[in-house]
Image: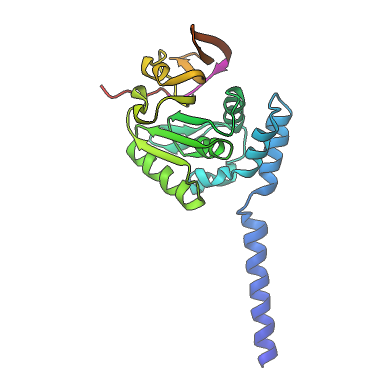
Amino acid sequence: MQRVVLFFLCLFLFVTVFISGVGGNQDYTDQRMKMVQQQLEARDIKDPEVLETMRTVKRHLFVPEDQQKRAYEDRPLSIGYGQTISQPYIVAYMTQAVRLKPGDKILEIGTGSGYQAAVLARIVKEVYSIEIIEALALRAEKTLNSIGYPNIFIKHGDGYQGWQEHAPYDVIIVTAAPDHVPEKLLEQLAVGGRMVIPVGTSFQNLYLMTKTEDGIKKETLLPVRFVPMVENK
């Protein structure tokens, strides 16, 4: 009798592990590796540190549970409140474009899910991130704390105003599209600092802006589609 009970107990454990490990595939490692290979390396993402970070950060943890199986597709996904998590390629492209250094202090405008902040935080010293939708700011903070990112600091506030308390920043990444470049963000960028920002309404361009002693150097990168950047009136 004991052998029968032991047999069925082992069988139950085996089926449970099989279902969770194969059917549920909760880690999505294969999908993440394929994402990097097919969506990033096959295009123009060449920075080895960016590629390794994209292999490491688990994007599915930053999307609603009912969308986790789609987390590594080459597309943005809804995270609620009319907001999206950017497609993996855009996250990697913007991260590569600002030429990160280990000691950089970054300001991110538009925390959203927290995924872009997590990617940045694995490469640089500190990430300060602002989100205008309080529920998203709280959810992102909870997600990041549960994974373990002590170098990310999140604030509920207006991205147009930046975060003056910790300025100047070596890098500013804007993940929503204003119709103009906010002057206060330029003011909070250090000399030699880089800002990547989508600008426009129906049609947007992604720009790389570098602050020099003589002013702002502006470079057009590529056409993009981001949700509008909301301003407190």
Q: Position of residue 113 (x, y in %)?
A: 46, 39
Give residue 227's position: percent from left, percent from top.
44, 25
Q: Quadrant of residue 119?
A: top right
Residue 24 vs 82, above or below: the answer is below
For the record, the magenta segment spans: 222-227
Q: Position of residue 25 (x, y in %)?
A: 64, 54
User: With respect to residue 114, does 98 lie above or below?
Assistant: above
Q: Position of residue 180 (x, y in %)?
A: 40, 12
| Residue at the front extreme, as displayed | 213
Q: Name the foreground residue: 23 vs 142.
A: 142
Viewer-closest of 211 and 158: 211
Q: How many marks?
A: 0
> Which residue is found at the position 45% from the left and 29% from the top?
107
Q: Residue at x 66, y 41 (%)?
A: 55
User: Which residue occupies the foreground of this view, 66 or 227?
Assistant: 227
Residue lying at the far bottom in this picture: please name it.
1
* In magenta stretch: residue 131: no
153 lies above or below 185: below
Q: Is residue 118 left or right of residue 167?
A: right
